[in-house]
């Protein structure tokens, strides 16, 4: 909930920097936050899986 608010505020400020309204930026800020909330953990899990696979391969070669 707080992340949505922060995303909306940041998006609004970015959108208002051109001198026009900030409603579209607020919506994009919330959507961006929602996407990042799901993508970043997925990337972290993927990285752990890749590193673990590399580690297991190294151990098997020894």
Image (cartoon, rainbow, N blue to C red):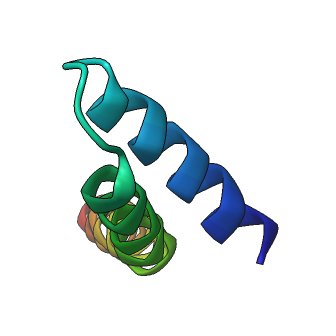
Res. 39 visible in picture: no
| x and y, in percent, of residue 9 in the image | 58, 46
Please tell me which residue is depicted at 66% across the width and 51% down the height of the picture. Answer: 6
* Image location (x, y in percent) of residue 37: 51, 73
Say which of 14 and 22 sits in front.
22
- Whether residue 22 appears in this view of the structure is yes
Q: Quadrant of the N terminus?
A: bottom right
Who is closer to the viewer here, 13 or 3? 13
Horizontal side of residue 38 vs 35, given as left or right: right
Q: Is 21 or 35 nearer to us in this picture?
A: 21
Q: Measured from the top left, where is residue 48 in percent x and y?
A: 45, 67
The quarter of the image holding the C terminus is: bottom left
* Residue in the picture at 53% in, 57% down: 8
Residue 16: quarter of image: top left
* Residue 20 falls left or right of residue 32: left
Vertical placement of residue 31 versus 15, above or below: below
Which residue is depicted at the point 33% across and 74% down? 46
């Amino acid at each position: 909930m707080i992340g949505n608010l922060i995303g909306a505020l940041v998006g609004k400020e970015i959108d208002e920097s051109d001198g026009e309204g900030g409603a579209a930026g607020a919506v994009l800020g919330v959507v961006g936050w929602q996407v990042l909330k799901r993508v970043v953990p997925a990337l972290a899990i993927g990285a752990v899986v890749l590193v673990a696979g590399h580690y297991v391969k190294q151990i098997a070669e020894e």
